[in-house]
Amino acid sequence: MEELRSSGVQLLKSPTLKNGDVARVANGQHPTKSVSYTLWTTMDNDSLNVPSTDPEAAGLVEERSEYDITVKLFLLPKSSLLDWRRHLQDAIAAVLQELSVDSIDLLIVSFPGVSFDTDSEEKTGGCGSNKVQATESELLDAIIDVWQAVEMLQTNGVVTKTGVAEFGQERLQEFLPKTSRRPTVNQINVRDACVVPESIMQFAKQESLELLTHSDCTNILPRGTLRDLLGDGPNGAGVLAGPNSGGRGLRGDLTPEWVVKYTAVVRDRGVIEHKGYFASAELSKEAAS
């Protein structure tokens, strides 16, 4: 496939701004850190755009019907299970706004604490640390709660097809009976193995599930990586304060919450016209020393 354009931003929630503020930092796009980030950002409905966005640059070139739009949401390990439904809504809203559309064709949700393993079909963990502080029962309840929100998006016409990621047969057997609208896709990461286990293939066929493979890391945005991206280091955006920031920047402990990946492919040409990421993190205030 030919790739025409790639874009993406990070979202930073911070109590050092107003409550509910979000900072957006374009991938690798920031001016010199000798200039305060407040001079190249703009506030928009309690959100801080970093850098200032160009609303005319967003959107698809051709008619919406000419595209297949796929979105994958990664809920991250340190995020609160109680916030997952809100994270889903925020992520979908960000993509719809970026592409200037009102619907997507396929939504896949990846949950922390679950990763596919070709030997045991499924295990907790994953590349990086993907563990979640919850029992299996609590995790299933949280997954069902998010899925109810996914079903609502499908009912309202925002999403056409839905999918999950990294579900083995046992988890699918627990999950599917609790859904009103079943996923049609199960995306799995077989990593170094080239063959999908026969057992999950047979089960997917029985349940009319399409099996897709991928190479995404389930813990796609570790805390340290995000701090490097937003910090005062040589490759950072200078949004976060650090030893070289001269007192400028936001201070606090950074916790990634979610990442969403999206692609818009022109159907008749197989061209990726838009490809990008959004991410969200919470910046908590530093404890008084």
Image: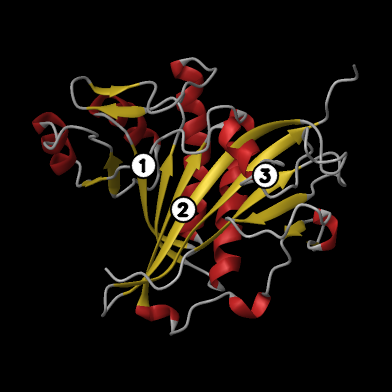
- The mark found on residue 242 in the picture is none
Mark 2 vs mark 3, CA separation in Å: 19 Å
Residue 195 placed where, x, y %? 11, 36
Residue drawn at 74 percent across, 43 percent down: 13
Q: Nearer the viewer, mark 1 or mark 3?
A: 3
Identify which amino acid the numbered label 1 is placed on: Asp
Specify which label sits upstream in the sequence, 1 or 3: 1
Identify which amino acid the numbered label 3 is placed on: Leu
Of the pair 68 and 249, the residue shown nearer to us: 249
Residue drawn at 47 percent across, 34 percent down: 144
* Mark 1 element type: loop
Relative to residue 188, is residue 46 drawn left or right? right
96 versus 24 height, above or below:
below
Residue drawn at 81 percent across, 53 percent down: 34
* Mark 2 element type: strand
Relative to residue 84, is residue 196 drawn left or right? left
Specify which label sits upstream in the sequence, 1 or 2: 1
Q: Nearer the viewer, mark 2 or mark 3?
A: 3
Residue drawn at 74 percent across, 60 percent down: 49
Residue indicated by mark 1: 216
Residue 86 placed where, x, y %? 63, 44
* Mark 3 element type: helix
Residue 52 placed where, x, y %? 73, 66
Identify which amino acid the numbered label 2 is placed on: Lys
| Disc 1 + disc 2, Cβ < 8 Å | yes
Mark 1 vs mark 2, CA separation in Å: 10 Å
- Quadrant (top left/top right/bottom left/bottom right) for the N terminus: bottom left
Residue indicated by mark 3: 230
Residue indicated by mark 2: 261
